[in-house]
Amino acid sequence: MSVGASAVRPLGAADRASVDGILRALRATGIFNDDEVETALELIDEWLQDGDASGYLTYVIEDATGVRGYVCFGPTPMTAGTYDLYWIAVDPATQGRGYGRRLLAFAEAEVERRGGRLLLIETSSQVAYGATIRFYERSGYDLAARIANFYRPGDHKLVYAKEFGSPQSD
Amino acid sequence: MSVGASAVRPLGAADRASVDGILRALRATGIFNDDEVETALELIDEWLQDGDASGYLTYVIEDATGVRGYVCFGPTPMTAGTYDLYWIAVDPATQGRGYGRRLLAFAEAEVERRGGRLLLIETSSQVAYGATIRFYERSGYDLAARIANFYRPGDHKLVYAKEFGSPQSD
C-alpha cells in the first residue's frame, strides 16, 4: 500500500473507462450527481481530443492495481496566470492513501511550471462540509469567496485559493 | 432621444456586425480588450447557431438609428435557478440614455420568467471602478464576492448578485 508504488501521468484514451468507473462510484456515495459526472466526462473528452489546447489538463494516478484517481485543471479564460482546478476524484475504495494529496500536489507543481500564480477550487458547501474542506485547508488553501445559494437554495459556492510564486510576477 | 423609441428584441444574424462595431468602439475606449471582444463574439455565434440551447440568451436594444447595445445572459451550468449575466454593452456614442438600464431590466425580467432566482454579474475591479460599480449598485446588486488578483496581479474579480422571487422557491 505504499504511495511510492503509484505514479501520476497524463490521462489517455484507455483510461477513460477507469475514470468513468471512479466517477460512478463517487456518484453512488452521493459526492457527485449525474450532471456532474456527465460534465466531468465531457471535459475528459475535450482533453483526449485537443490535449493542452483544450484547457483541461487531465492526469491520472495509477498504482499496481490500476487507475485510482484523476485531476483536471487548466488556465482560467481571460486571466493572466490564474488556473482552475475543475475536478479531483479518487476511487472511494482507495481513499486514505494520500492519492488525492498527491494529485493536488502534482496539479500545483504543474500550474507553477506553466507560470501560474493562483489556483482556485470551487466547491459546493454541501460537498465541502467536512472532509473536503479539511483537505483543502490542510493543503494550504484559503476560503476566498462564498456565493450564497449558488447551486440551489441553501447550497452555496465556496471558492478556495492558493497563491504561488513571487507576488511581483506579472 | 426618448427611450420610448427603442425596443429590445432577440439578436439575429443581421445584427452581428452592429454589435461587433459596438464592442470595437468599447475596446477603443479601453473598456474591453481584444480577448474579451473575441470571447463576446464567440458567445454571440453560439447563440446564433443554437438559440436558447446555447445557454447564451442574447438580445439587442434598437432605436430609430439602429442597434445601440446588447445583453447576453444564461443559466449557470450545474445550478438550479442561477443565471450569469455574461455581457452587457452599449454604444459609447449613445450612453446616458438609459439603454444599459433597459437591457439589464429586460434580462432580469427574462431570468425571472424562466424561473431564475439569482442573477450574478462578474466584473473586473479595474473595469468596475466608478461608473460600472455605481450602475450595478443603483440597479439593486450587492457585492457577493471578491477574488483578489483574479485577472492579473492587482486586478480583482468582483461578483455582483441580485436575488429574485420568494426565497423558499426551489
Image (cartoon, coloured by chain):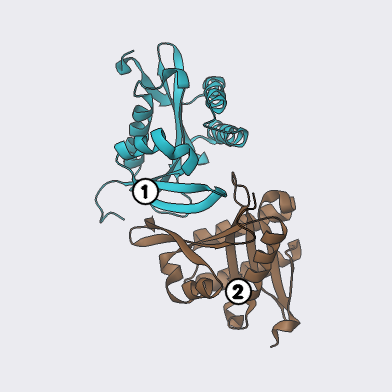
Chain colours: A brown, B cyan
Q: Amino acid at mark 1?
A: Leu
* Residue B50 quadrant: top right
**Between B50 and B151, which is closer to the camera in this rendering?**
B151
User: Which circle, 2 or 1, is nearer the viewer?
Assistant: 1
User: Which residue lies at the image location 75% right of the left edge and 63% below the top edge?
Assistant: A12
Q: Amino acid at mark 2?
A: Val
- How many numbered markers are drawn? 2
**Position of residue B43 measured from the top left corner of the image (x, y, whole percent):** 55, 36
* Residue A45 quadrant: bottom right
User: Which residue lies at the image location 40% right of the left edge and 35% below the top edge?
Assistant: B130
Q: Is residue B14 left or right of residue A113?
A: left
**Position of residue A55 measured from the top left corner of the image (x, y, whole percent):** 66, 51
Q: Is residue A39 left or right of residue A156?
A: right
Residue B166 is at least partly visible in this image = yes
**Between A20 and B42, which is closer to the camera in this rendering?**
B42
Q: Chain of mark 1?
A: B
What SS does tag 2 mark? strand
Is residue B139 placed above or below A32 in the rendered structure?
above
Q: Residue furthest front?
A: A168
Residue A17 is at least partly visible in this image = no
Q: Chain of mark 2?
A: A
Q: Rounded to the nearest whole Å, what is the CA distance between mark 2 and mark 1? A: 35 Å
**Position of residue B72 measured from the top left corner of the image (x, y, whole percent):** 46, 35
**Do tags 2 and 1 sit on the same chain?**
no
What SS does tag 1 mark? strand
User: Which residue lies at the image location 34% right of the left edge and 38% below the top edge?
Assistant: B108
Quarter in which the N terminus of chain A is drawn? bottom right
Is residue A162 placed above or below B90 in the rendered structure?
below
Number of residues whose C-alpha sits closer than 10 Å to that of mark 2, classed few (under 14), some (14–19) or many (20 or more): many
The residue under label 2 is: A90
The residue under label 1 is: B143
